Amino acid sequence: MEQHKSRLVYTIGMLTLFLCGAVLFLIGFFPASYSVAEPHSTVPEGRPTTLHGVEVTPPPPAHDAFILFLIDALRDDFPSATSMPVAHSRACEKLTLHVDIPTVTMPRLKSITTGTLSNFIDIALNVGHTEQLQDSLLHRLKKRNKVVSFAGDHTWVRLFPSEFTRQAENHDSFYVNDFYEGDRNVTKTLESELERSDWSLLILHYLGLDHIGHVEGSASPRVPLKLKEMDEAVQKILDHNNFPNYLLMLTGDHGMADGGGHGGNTPVETTVPLFLYSNNCSKTTSSTKRYNQIDLAPTLAVLLSVEIPTLSIGCLIPEMLQSLSLEHQMYAYFYNAHHLLNKARVKFGHDRVHRSDYYTWYQNATLLHKKLLHPLREGGGGGASQVYYQNAKLNYMRVAREISGLLSESLVKFDYGFIALGLALTTASSLHIVLSVLYLDLTEQLQLDSLKPGQLLVSVIAAVLLNVTSHALDIILTSSTLASILLMVPISIAVYLTIDVAQALLKIALPPIYTRRLRISIPLPLPLLVCYAIRTLTLGSSSFIEYEYKTWYYLGNTLILLTAFRTLRRRITKTNVELDGRHLYTIASTCLWQMRKVFVMLMMLTLMRYIHRLQAIRSTIMIFSLLLLWARLHRHSQLPQSAASGAALFMVYCFRGLNGQVQFFEVPPYMAAKLMVPTLVIFWCCLALVLVLGYRAALPQTKSFGQVPPKSVLLQLLQTNLSSSLLLAALLQKVQNILLLPVLLVALQQTYKLCDVFGTSARKFSVRLVHVYKIIMTIFLARMFFFYQGNSNSLSTIDLTPGYIGQTSYNPSIVALFVTLNTYSAEIHAFLYLVVHTLRSDLRSVGIMQLQPPYSIAADSLIAPLYAALIMLPAAFYLCLMVGFRYHLFIYSVFSPKVLYDCYTVLVFYLVFLVTSLYFKLFKHDA
């Protein structure tokens, strides 16, 4: 049993090292914050006061009051003449803003207030973020003692904890089931602020539309009602007479995908409207002009008469400057170009800037600007002045756009030291576990699964030298001496694993002179290798990543169909030989009939692609799904446990019925709302009963505990865990996706039977061959069902609704647990089912006597390390691809979300495997 114990501990160790390496890689590839100019203090903060010796004066505030009306997830096509008639008809300007990725709230707020781009990793920091910005529009206003009021999303308060004079934040901003209450509070604050006249800037951030999208999608009937509510709030501002000179800006922080989520790079997520309202606008215009969201910060800074934030790399929006005089407009364009030119000097150096084309444009613009100043101050506005004005404006805007683009590109920074260290850990750990699984003899010779003190000492010495050299050459940059010392640990481990891998590869590559040739310990069938290699190599194409589900659909079905035909051919050939070639047609018909369930399963897998289209009959589908799931659970449960499972599934249907998602008894809305909580309480009680009944055999006080074989106890515990997880997943899944749970179990069962028959039909039976087929089939089916569920490699398809089922407030731990269980349901349950199946299997059922060591021992001696290796290896390969594609056009829109998905997949498997290994350790005497 020591061998099996070491394989579990070894596998957990390799997974841990892989995840540590992945974290280091992500730190190096996605630095926590962007900095355009390294020493910000060298960028002049004050506004220029002279132009070629002529005094220029910054413009005063263009309006008495500014209102930023921010509707979360307001995409560009939402406000229209029908959905928001007041807002649409009374807008002075209708513009469009392009939103940079990631399209989530926190980084978008940073872009609006600072004028700089956000890092992609901000999408991971969006939830529970505590960073406080050091410079922004709000900081500039506070320095001038301006009153700034705020109401809405509490993310603002976390970013700006002391910059608001008055604030009314929604503390449950992440509680997506709140469609109306938070917005009503914002509107109440709006009404009270409209009665005041002391504020310069009022920020309103409405969240209801975003929450509706997350829960019900962009096509929800609640969306038009919410837009109407927002329209009424806009009307309250426009009809109020307390502010004779105001500027109202209606926009969104990001858009909304068709499924209701956001975070991706589709046009509906990266395009938001910008409607401008003022009581001084001459006429209503509709413009198709498009600007960047980061352009809001410098434009508002000019209009508010404060300094442009140091980090800003945005340009000006001309339509927002119409209320300024021509002289002040010229100053605005000059100031923004001057600011960006200073940043370019700091970033690229004076010599490079002075040799550039944009510096020549800047010089020409300032000369024209100087010529224009005298006639403007004298009140003249002739034809020559207009020519000077247009040419100066054009050159200033060309300068700003050119430098803004260059600074945006310069934001792409990589910490190659951390990237190299992360790649070393992930690649070495992946190859280490692959070699240890493929070559058991090599594992024993080199002691790959044990610690060697001498090699460890060499690794530490090498790590010291590497660490010192890397810091001396600025390859690795750390914030403190402690961090530098702590880096010794991963560097030492990476060197240790690299030595092991190098030794193993040399032994495999060099010819055996004094020792026998190494043999691969497990068979590697060519079809499996080809399918797995195709899947891995397609990671190098952005199109294959965007449409990865098609790859899995094709390879998964092809692999099952190919195995079925090979099995069919073997059985027909074998039987035909035994009967001397007689009755070939009867033999073929009989063998084909015996394979009927496999072909039915393939048809079911094909139908699962279109499950999302069956909305019209979802009540019938849900009833059928719950009955089928109960039947699958009943096969390996006792009567009391089956009854509890049935009651839990009935509560799932009742909950969906009370929500109005399926047909149910006619219940008044107020009564349905009251019954939801008791329904969920009964469900949790039934789920707890399933766990108690399943665990009772393992409790020491149970009288029959000593009479139950340990293997049966372990099997019963893992089966109970699987059943409980499936019941919880049935509650969390969308109505149409519940069918995937029993279909996954059926598909796995039939696939495993096919693998057993395929193995027994071979001339020489190999237990390891059967296991290899089952493991790879499990991985392929799990990925297929992952995409059947509606998931993709875009972050916008993550369904947050399950995280809030039964919750009355935002609890990040519960939300993360439920969303993970829902998103990775197929991955989790496929692995658990494989382990349970392996423990339960008896080869006598397929005509093979029980072998020694027992067939079930492979659950921890072969399946665990091989499954982990096949999960880790593509992820490690993809991390290497990320380095090669780091300057690819789609690096942040396509490749980066995929790397987060892959790393999180390994993390989910790690956690599930860790819990499963605990049971093996507690009941390790069962083998």
Image (tube, rainbow, N blue to C red):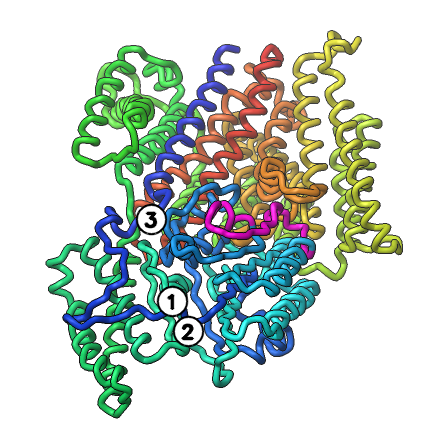
Mark 2 is surrounded, within 10 Å at the Cα level, by few (under 14), some (14 to 19) or many (20 or more) other residues, namely some
Q: Residues within 10 Å of mark 1 (few under 14, many from 20)?
A: many
Identified by mark 3, the residue type is Tyr
> Which structural element holds mark 1?
helix
Q: Which residue is mark 2?
A: 320
- Distance, label 3 to label 1, CA atoms, is 21 Å
Q: How many marks?
A: 3
* Classed neighbour count for the residue bearing mark 3: other residues with Cα under 10 Å, few (<14), some (14–19), many (≥20): some
Mark closest to the chain's N terminus, 3 or 1: 3
Magenta highlight on residue 166: yes
| Viewer-nearest residue: 595 or 773 | 773
The secondary structure type at the circle numbered 3 is loop
**As rendered, which of 402 and 619 lies closer to the eye?**
402
Quadrant containing the C terminus in the rendered view: top right
- Residue 286 lies, with reference to residue 537, above or below; the image says below
Q: Determine contact: label 3, label 2, CB under 8 Å.
A: no
Q: Residue at x 57, y 46 (%)?
A: 786
Nearer mark to the viewer, of 3 and 2 = 2
Query: From which residue to which does the magenta span run?
Result: 154-180
Q: Please name the amino acid that badge 1 sits on.
A: Thr
Residue 173 within the magenta-colored segment of the rendering: yes
Single out the residue that lies furthest toward the bottom: 383
> Could you tell me if residue 575 is visible in this image?
no
Q: Which mark is residue 299?
A: 1
Please provide percent x and percent y for residue 60.
37, 69
Label placed on residue 96: none
Q: Magenta: predominant secondary structure element? A: loop
Q: Secondary structure at mark 2?
A: helix
Cα separation between marks 3 and 2? 28 Å
Are dots 1 and 2 in contact, CB under 8 Å? Answer: yes
Residue under label 3: 34
Q: Residue at x 28, y 89 (%)?
A: 381
